[in-house]
Image (spheres, rainbow, N blue to C red):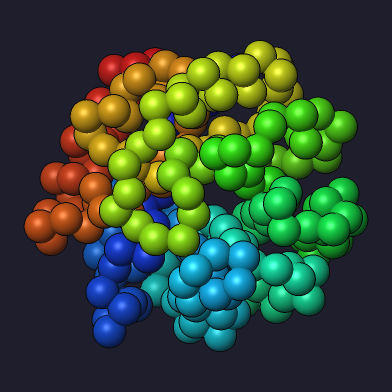
Amino acid sequence: MTKEILIAPSILSADFAKLGEEVQAIDKAGCDWVHIDVMDGHFVPNITIGPDVVKALRPHTKKIFDTHLMIENCDAYIEAFAKAGSDYISVHAEACTHLEGSIQLIRSNNVKAGVAINPHTSLNVLEYLLDKIDLVIIMSINPGFGGQKFIPQTLQKLRNLSAMIGERDIRVEIDGGVTALNAGEIVKAGANVLVAGTATFKGGKYKENIAAIRASANAGK
C-alpha cells in the first residue's frame, strides 16, 4: 500500500527555551507531523518532556502530534498524554511488560497506537500485533540523544517489515539519523514517515531543510 511520505521533525532538536515558537516555525516551514520524544532517564539516559508540555504546545499547531514514549511504566502516563493532545502514542516493545495491553490502553483513549523497537530488537515482537496497531517506529539509532548517525543495517530491517505488513494500513516510521542524503534510500526500503531532528533544525533554515529531506524522500518512492 503506497502512502504519502510524511516529514516529522523531532522537537528534541528544537530550542527548548521557545518551544511553542519552534513548533509554529516547523509547521509554517512545511512539516507534516510533530514528533515528540518523551524520555524518563530510566529507559533511556536522558530526560525530556511530560504531558503538561505537550498540552501547552497543542494550541500552537493543528499538525499531528506523534508522541514517542521512551519510558518505563508507560501505562501510567498514556491517558495523560492522550488528554494532552497526542494523535499517536507509541510505546517501546522493550519497555512494556504486557505490550498488547499497552496498545489496548492507547486505543481506549481514542488515540492511534504505535510500537517502537530498538536496533537490536527483532521484528518478531510485532508479528501478533500487526492487526492492532497503526504505526511502527524503527529506531535507526540507539535511543536517548539526537545527532547520532544512521545505522545502515536498518534498511534491511525496513524491507523485512514491509514484507510483514503487506497490505495492512500501518505507517512505518524511521527515527534516527535521517538526512537529505539518506532519505531516498530509507523510503525505498519501506519507510513512509521520516523523523528528522538535527536535519530539520540545523542552521535555522527549517523550510529549506524540510524541503530537501522531502525531495530526497520522494525520489526514493
* Image quarter in which the C terminus is found: top left
On screen, residue 215 versus residue 67, left or right, reads: left
On screen, residue 141 versus residue 105, left or right, reads: left
Q: Residue at x 23, y 34 (%)?
A: 180
Residue 38, percent from left and from top: 54, 68
Q: Residue at x 48, y 76 (%)?
A: 47
Kindly tell me whether residue 51 is visible in this rendering: yes
Nearer the observer, 203 or 99: 99
Residue 151, percent from left and from top: 40, 34
On screen, residue 147 versus residue 167, left or right, reads: left
Q: Residue at x 65, y 38 (%)?
A: 121
When the figure is inspected, residue 143 is found, relative to residue 183, above or below; the finding is: below
Q: Residue at x 86, y 32 (%)?
A: 128
Residue 40, percent from left and from top: 57, 74
* Image quarter in which the N terminus is found: top right
Q: Quadrant of residue 184?
A: top left
Kindly tell me whether residue 112 is visible in this rendering: no
On screen, residue 35 versus residue 83, left or right, reads: left
